[in-house]
Image (cartoon, helix red, strand yellow):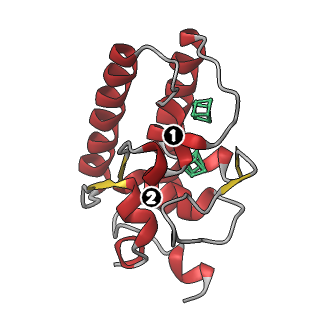
Amino acid sequence: MNSDEHKKNPTPTHSLETVLQAVQQVYDWLDEKIAEMNSSCQACGRCCDFDAYGHRLYVTTPEMLYFLNRTCQEMQFMTDGVCPYQKDGRCQARQARFSACRIFFCTGDNRRQYELSEEAVRRFRNICRQYDLTYRYIDLKYALSHPEVWFA
Ligand code: SF4
Ligand code: SF4
């Protein structure tokens, strides 16, 4: 499947660009809230190694759509428990990365991260309602390991 096939309009009644802009607004809001937390990250990349780190992150349909259309990277899939976009500790898809990746800081305030996650999910669910998108909430490791969940 070529990259243009990934970028087809998700809904019959709304343009893809409108949906992507709605997702961008959630990320802009989120990035502002995350900056207020003032958490630090050493860019070690350990939390992008899902197997070794042992945590679970989740992704929603609008975020997947955004990622497919906004990342400058070719779509890659996980073969070894490590996110394929992690290189030398850094995220190669940083501009398009998922809300869970934005929110998680190993030294961050867990309660605040949970609150932000819940609110982000609520906003993504609203985007699905507003733009007639099927809402899915998927384990990110599973999504990054299964091409079919992106292109179904
Ligand atoms: S948040 Fe992730 S990349 Fe940053 S220091 Fe912690 S484990 Fe390393
Ligand atoms: S998308 Fe980026 S931040 Fe998220 S798990 Fe992959 S490398 Fe880490």
Question: Residue 127, located in which quarter of the rendered image?
Answer: top left
- Residue 152 in percent (x, y) is at 33, 78
Q: Residues within 10 Å of mark 2 (few under 14, many from 20)?
A: many
Query: Going from the N terminus, do you reach mark 2 or mark 1 first?
Result: 2
* Location of mark 1 (residue): 101
- Front residue of 94/30: it is 94
Residue drawn where x is 66% and y is 45% of the image? 94
Q: Secondary structure at mark 1?
A: helix
* Location of mark 2 (residue): 64
- Front residue of 43/25: it is 43
- Residue 67 in percent (x, y) is at 54, 57
- Residue 64 in percent (x, y) is at 45, 58
Amino acid marked by disc 1: Cys
Choose mark 2 or mark 1, whichever is in front.
Answer: 1
- Residue 74 in percent (x, y) is at 67, 71
Query: Which of the image's four quarters has the N terminus?
Result: bottom right
Q: Secondary structure at mark 2?
A: helix
Residue drawn where x is 53% and y is 11% of the image? 37
